[in-house]
Amino acid sequence: MSSRIGFRFLAVALALTRRGGRLQERLQASGVRAGQIVLDYACGPGFYSIPAARLVGPSGHVFALDIQPAAAVMVEARARAAGLTNVTTITSACGTSLPDGTVDLVLLYDAIAGIADKRAVLAEIDRVLRPGGVLSVWVEHGRPEATVPLITGNSRFILRERKAAILDFSRPPEAPRAEPA
């Protein structure tokens, strides 16, 4: 099975599990607001990218990153169908190519367990997240209590709030930058 067909199968399966979910409310609770720059890391088919783009509006922007090229194709198609022009896709396993300190909020939803090099990804998120920015992590597969020390290690982030399996971390305004992995 090609990776593109496999990704499409996964997207359909995930869509069925997300049907009826309150995606927009979850994003608002994590702080997605008009005018923000949001990075949806490991975005998959864009379940959160598209609602986030609606919330940030035309004065904001959403960057949707995934390792799968098929994810970028799907997110771009969904953004076009929704009439959204504030979504940019990035195909990468780690690097974003975004400037330092330019992202207001990073979404890492149902992805941390599947990331091979967690240290490198967290260092990249630390690099692009502005001081005072938020990293929102949804731990659907795994234990949230095991995720907290991974993310708060090296004084990179501080746990701001826990809402069941959603962990919101803030990057302290004077936090030291992570060392490259």
Image (spheres, rainbow, N blue to C red):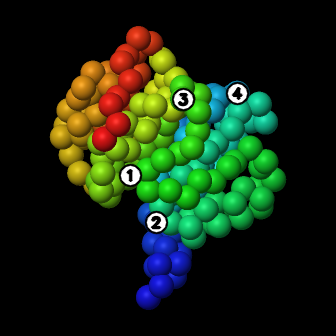
Residue 57 at least partly seen: yes
Percent across and percent down for residue 99 are 59, 33
Three-letter residue code for mark 2: Leu
Q: Return the mark for residue 35.
A: 4
Of label 4 and label 2, which has the lower sequence position? 2
**Is there a contact, CB below 8 Å, between mark 3 and mark 4?**
no
Q: How many marks?
A: 4
Residue 9 higher or lower than 144, as above or below: below
Three-letter residue code for mark 4: Gly
Q: Which residue is mark 2?
A: 14
Of label 1 and label 4, which has the lower sequence position? 4
Mark pair 3, 2: CA separation: 32 Å
- Which quadrant is the N terminus positioned in? bottom left
Q: Which residue is mark 1?
A: 110
Count neighbours of disc 2 (C-alpha within 10 A) and say few if under 14, some if 14 to 19, many if 20 or more.
Answer: some
Residue 25 at least partly seen: no
Three-letter residue code for mark 1: Asp
Mark pair 3, 1: CA separation: 25 Å
Q: Return the mark for residue 100.
A: 3
Q: Disc 3 on helix, strand or loop? A: loop
Residue 171 higher or lower than 98, as above or below: above
